[in-house]
Image (cartoon, rainbow, N blue to C red):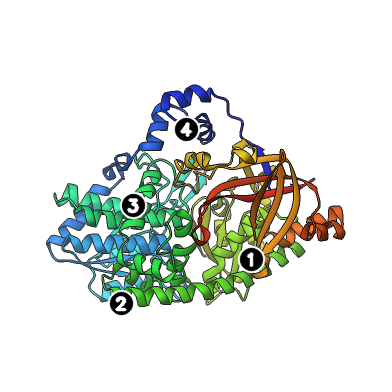
Amino acid sequence: MAKWVEVRKAGNFEEIGRRNHISPVLARLLRNRGIEEDAQIQAYLHGGLEQLHDPGLLKDMDLACGILAEAIEEGKKIRVIGDYDVDGVCASAILVRGLRNAGADVDAVIPHRVRDGYGMNMDMIENAYADGVDVLLTCDNGISAREEVAQAVAYGITVIITDHHEVPFEDTPEGRRYFVPEADAVVDPKQPDCPYPYKGICGAYVAFQLICFLHKEILQRELTPAFYDELLQLAAFATIEDIMDLLDENRPLVKRGLELLNTRPVRGIRELITVLGLGDKPIRAYQVGFMLGPCINASGRMDTAEKALRLLLTEDADEAMEIAGELQVLNEERKTMTERAAEEAYAIIDRDYAQDKVYVVYLPDCHESIAGIVAGRVKEKYGHPALIVTDAEDGLKGSARSITAYHMYEGMTEVADVFTRFGGHAQAAGFSLPAEKLDELRRRLNENCKLEEKDFGEVLRIDLLLPLQYANYALLREISLLEPTGQGNRRPLFGRAGLTLTRLDFYGADDIVCKLSVRDQGHGFEMTMFRRSEEIRTAIADKYGDQTLADLRGRGAEIPLLVVFTIKEDTYRGGNAIQLLVEDYKIQ
C-alpha cells in the first residue's frame, strides 16, 4: 500500500503569488517542487528554448563535429549505430537526418534485440570493416563498448561515441576508476570531467545537440526553423519515453516538443497519431509515454527497430501509414505477452521472494524483449528494485528497473563479475550472465543492499488538503501552468478526509472503471478510479461485510472514506467537465 505524505513546505504564499502574479495555490505547488526564488518561478512558468544549454559544453563535442565535418568534406562513409528503444531510434533518426542535411554519406544500423543484444558488438565492427565504413558514430550506446571500440580502431575505423549512460567504473582504495573507451571522441555528459551543466539528458538530445553544433559552429550554417523543429520534437519525444526528469533544460525542450507534436509532427509520428485515433485529441506527455512511444518500442521488441527508424525517416505518407499500422499490431501483441509475464512474476514473488529487498525473477518463457516492461510493472506494484531474467541464445539476459532509493547501475557494479555484460543508469539497466550465476546474482544483490523498510513502496506526496468543492476550473487552469508534468515534475496530488462513500458503480470491460459517489460537507460529488475495482470491492467486504457492499451497489450505504486525487478536464464524448481521479483511498 502506498504511503501518504503531505508536503508541508513553509512560505508566504500570498506574498510569493503577489510578486509573481500567480495565485497562492500555484505558489505553494511550485514551492513543493523546489521552485522558490522569483527568477526560478519566472523561468519555470515562462522560460523557453533559451534555457537549452550550449552544446559546446559537452566534452569532445568540438572534436567529434570536426571529425564529422572532415568526413563529409572528403565523402567518407559514416555509419550510425543506434539502439532498439525509443531513445535509440529517435537518436538514430536525428543523426541520419542531420548528417544527410549536411551532405554526408551516412546509413544506420540498429542491433536486433535478440540476435545482437544491446549496443555495438563485434559483428557490427566486422560488417563495418567489410562495408568500407570510415566513421562509426554511436548514439544511446557505446560508453561501455571498450573492446568493440578497440577492434574498430585497430581496423583503422574512426569511432565517435555519443551516449548518456553511466561510464563503467570500479571502486579502488585510491578512489573510483572510470573506464572510458579509447574512441576518437566521446560525447557523454556522464563523464566525470564533462563540464556540461545538466547530466540528466537522453541519448536523442545528445544527438540533437551534436547536429546543432555541427551545423552552426563547424559548418557555419544554421538549420532551417522547420528542420530544427523536426529534430527537436524527436529529442523531446525520446526525453519523455526514456523517463528523463522534466527539470532544467528538459522542461522547455519537452514543452516545445509537445507544441510541435500537436501542430506539425514529423510525417511518421503524424501517421501513427492517426492510426491510434488520436488525431482529434491533444498530445500530451501521457499520450507520448503510454500510447505513441510503446508503438515505436514494439518494433524493437517484437521485430526489428529498423522498421521504427524507417517510420521516422520517411517523407512518404503511404509508407508511413503502412509502417504505423504494423507497429500498432506489434504493440497489441506486446501488451498480451506483457500481461501474461507480469502475472507470472507476481505469483513467483508472492510465493518465494517476500523477504527479498531486490527482486531477481527468472521467467524462462518470457520473451526477452518485454523483460524491461515486466520489471517496471513489478517495481510499480511492490515498490522494490526488480530484475527480470529470461533465457537467451547464450546464457541468460535481463532488464532491471529501480526505485528512487536504489541506484541500479551502482548496485550491479558491486557484483560486476557475475555478468557477461551490463550497462545502464540509476533507474534502469540491461544485462547478460551465465545461467549458473543466477542464484549468486540474487544472493549477492540482496546481501549488498542497504535499503530499509521505509525505502520500499510507492510514496504519494500530497500537495494540499482540499475540499472537493474547490476542485473547479479555476484550479484546473492553475494546474495547467505546471505542464508538462511527468518524471521529476509530478502532477499535483490533493488529499481529502471526512468523505462519505454512498454508492459504487462499475463500467467497461472487466469493470475497469469504478465510479464513486461521495458526499463532502453536504455536497455530492462523483469520483473516478481505474483498474482497482476488485480491490475496493474486497476491501469493503472485508471491513463491512458483503451486505454493505451489495447496498453500495444498489440502494446505497454510507462508509467513511479518505482519498488522494488529481483533477483533470474530462472531454469524453465531446463534453467538458471536471474529473476527479482517485489515485489512492483508505476505507475507514
Task: Point out the tag, 1 or 4, that comes first from the N-terminus.
Answer: 4
Q: Is residue 168 above or below residue 338?
A: above
Residue at mark 2: 318
Q: CA distance from mark 4 to mark 3?
A: 26 Å
Q: CA distance from mark 2 to mark 3?
A: 31 Å
Task: Point out the tag, 2 or 1, that comes first from the N-terminus.
Answer: 2
Q: CA distance from mark 2 to mark 1?
A: 47 Å
- Determine the residue positioned at 49% across, 43% down: 489
In the rendered image, which quarter is residue 266 located in? bottom left
Between tags 2 and 1, which lies in front? 2
Q: Amino acid at mark 2?
A: Asp
Is there CB contact under 8 Å for labels 1 and 4? no
- Determine the residue positioned at 40% across, 52% down: 202
**Secondary structure category for the residue under label 2:** helix
Residue 115 shown left or right of residue 77 in the figure: right
In the rendered image, which quarter is residue 196 located in? top left
Between tags 1 and 3, which lies in front? 3
Q: Residues within 10 Å of mark 4 (few under 14, many from 20)?
A: some
Q: Is residue 557 above or below residue 86?
A: above
Residue at mark 4: 35
Q: Which quarter of the image is occupied by the C terminus?
A: top right
Task: Point out the tag, 2 or 3, that comes first from the N-terminus.
Answer: 3
Q: Residue 514: tell me if it is visible.
A: yes
Q: Nearer the viewer, residue 521 or 142?
A: 521
Is there CB contact under 8 Å for labels 4 and 2? no
Residue at mark 3: 206
Q: Which mark is residue 438?
A: 1
Q: Amino acid at mark 1?
A: Leu
Task: Point out the tag, 4 or 2, that comes first from the N-terminus.
Answer: 4
